[in-house]
Amino acid sequence: EVQLQASGGGMVQPGGSLTLSCAVSGVTFDEYAIGWFRQAPGKERDGVSCISHSGMSTYYGNAVKGRSTISRDDYKNTVTLQMSNLEPEDTAVYYCAADDGVLGRGCSTFPRDSAMKHWGKGTLVTVSS
């Protein structure tokens, strides 16, 4: 069974930083692309970042480009998303998702989430003073 567990959410002041982690189990981790998506109240889910199965390619949504860094640790089966200079508009539930990067589409549809087959429960990020 594929499981993704997102963690690291919380409340942070504007201008602050946060690191989200996604722990993945039940798959051959280094064959899977991992993406981060977010959904704010009343809005559609949109893409934050995605990293290919090899780690050689990374993608960022326009709203977070230049403020975020995604990385993966294939020994720990985790993907980390570092976010800085956070804004109230970054307030959302953040989800990590996975797709087979070897036999599937991986990050190819990012920032759309249509390629991602496996999803974890989200973690809430609130940016507020």
Image (cartoon, grey):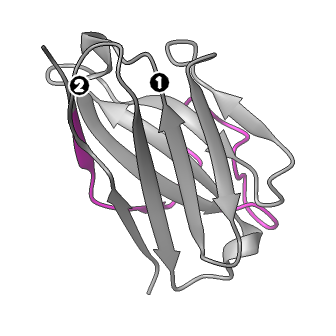
Q: Is residue 76 visible?
A: yes
Which disc is residue 127 wearing?
none
Nearest the eye: 33 or 7: 7
- Residue 72, given in percent of the width and then of the height, sits at 67, 58
* SS label for mark 1: loop
Q: Which residues are magenta?
A: 100-125
Which residue carries the number 2 mark?
40
Q: Is residue 113 visible?
A: no
> Is residue 124 found left or right of 97 in the rendered image?
left
Check disc 2 and give the amino acid type.
Answer: Ala
Which residue carries the number 1 mark?
84
- Residue 77, given in percent of the width and then of the height, sits at 60, 74
Q: Earlier in the sequence, mark 1 or mark 2?
A: 2
**Quadrant assignment for the N terminus:** bottom left
- Residue 87, given in percent of the width and then of the height, sits at 32, 12
- Residue 123, given in percent of the width and then of the height, sits at 25, 49
User: Is 123 contained in the magenta span?
Assistant: yes
> Is residue 88 found left or right of 46 in the rendered image?
left
